[in-house]
Image (cartoon, helix red, strand yellow):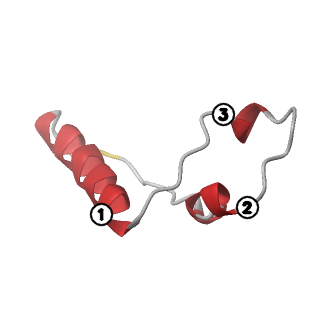
């Protein structure tokens, strides 16, 4: 059986709330997201892994 560990980028969660820093490669796209979007994203990652027979 294959397995994957998802690492949560805790700094990235708040990234949209801090001032932009010109020239950073992570400065674009600059989106503010909330809990519903995070939950949806994690559910999609888990569902995709399960479809491929990967434990998450």
Residue at 82% x, 36% y: name it. 24
Confirm whether residue 1 shows in the render.
no
First of labels 3, 1 by sequence position: 3
Q: Quadrant of residue 51?
A: top left
The residues bearing labels 2 and 1 have C-alpha atoms spaced at a distance of 20 Å
- Would you call the spot at circle 3 few (<14 residues within 10 Å), some (14-19), or many (20 or more)? few
- Would you call the spot at circle 1 few (<14 residues within 10 Å), some (14-19), or many (20 or more)? few
- Residue 38 in picture, x, y percent from top left: 37, 59
Residue 3, compared with residue 8, is above or below; it is: above
| Quadrant in which the C terminus appears | bottom left
For mark 2, give the secondary structure. Answer: loop
For mark 3, give the secondary structure. Answer: loop
The residues bearing labels 3 and 1 have C-alpha atoms spaced at a distance of 21 Å
Residue 49, compared with residue 34, is above or below; it is: above
Q: Which residue is mark 1?
A: 36
| Quadrant in which the N terminus appears | top left
Q: Quadrant of residue 36?
A: bottom left
- Residue 9 in picture, x, y percent from top left: 58, 58
Q: Is residue 36 left or right of residue 52?
A: right
Q: Which residue is mark 3?
A: 28
Q: Is residue 50 left or right of residue 16?
A: left
For mark 1, give the secondary structure. Answer: helix
Residue at 29% x, 45% y: name it. 45
| Callout count | 3
- Would you call the spot at circle 2 few (<14 residues within 10 Å), some (14-19), or many (20 or more)? few
Confirm whether residue 53 shows in the render.
yes
Q: Is residue 10 left or right of residue 35?
A: right
Residue at 17% x, 46% y: name it. 47
- Residue 21 in picture, x, y percent from top left: 85, 45
Q: Which mark is residue 8?
A: none
Q: Which residue is mark 2?
A: 18
The residues bearing labels 2 and 3 have C-alpha atoms spaced at a distance of 13 Å
């Amino acid at each position: 059986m294959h397995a994957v560990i998802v690492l949560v980028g805790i700094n990235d969660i708040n990234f949209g709330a801090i001032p932009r820093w010109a020239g950073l490669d992570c400065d674009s796209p600059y989106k503010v997201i909330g809990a519903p979007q995070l939950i949806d994203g994690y559910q999609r990652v888990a569902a995709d892994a399960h479809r491929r027979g990967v434990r998450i």
